Image (cartoon, rainbow, N blue to C red):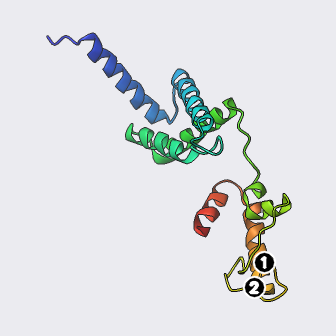
Amino acid sequence: MLVMTPAAAKMQRKLARVERDAERGKLGEGRYEHLVKELARVIRLAFEAGATGTLFGLEGPLRHGIRADLCLQGWRWHSADRMASELLDDAFRRVRAKRPTWNEGQPEWAIAAGTLIKRTRCVRCCKPLPEGHFKFCGDLCAGVYHNALSLRREAQGDRAVDMAVRSI
């Protein structure tokens, strides 16, 4: 008869738990809380050390890493991505990070805040600006730019992400 060592039994229980979590698409409460606590610690440390400019500076790499680990544990991509997002949202709440508005992330915000940007080229098509024009070379570029801008502002969730990725 084969006798299992305590270490082997512990490893088997851990693998069973990981498999169960992957099937459910949900982490156990203790594991979830531990991960949120560790993520908050890493986010705070990176920011205080000056490694990131904002508390959100590691959001992309952390989300990617968590999602990849969960996928390697057998999670479906969408479930892993949703869980990574939830973990990070809770970690950001724990460090009291306030996400800026969409407008605050745009170059135009600098102008609204009082900083002037001297432009020599059209914002949309990059042609040299005619005399007396400060942002766009003409009405066509201005109209297209403002229409696209309003569509981005009104977008929510996955649609906003899709639009941002396509504009890069």
Query: Residue 10 at what x, y percent from top left?
Result: 33, 16
Q: Look at the numbered discs 1 and 2 and tell me whether their residues touch, using CB distance below 8 Å.
A: yes
Viewer-nearest residue: 70 or 38: 38
What is the C-alpha distance between the residues marked 1 and 2?
A: 7 Å
Query: Residue 79 at what x, y percent from top left?
Result: 51, 42
Q: Is residue 8 above or below residue 162?
A: above
Density class for disc 1 (Cα within 10 Å; few <14, some 14-19, many ≥20) is some
Q: Is residue 36 above or below residue 164?
A: above
Mark 2: amino acid: Leu
Query: Residue 85 at what x, y percent from top left?
Result: 59, 42
Please report whichever mark, 1 or 2, sits nearer to the chain's N-terminal start.
2
Q: Split into 4 quadrants, where in the image is the N terminus?
A: top left
| Residue 135: assigned label | 1
Q: Could you tell me which residue is drawn at 63 percent across and 44 percent down?
A: 56
Secondary structure at badge 1 equals: loop
| Residue 129: assigned label | 2
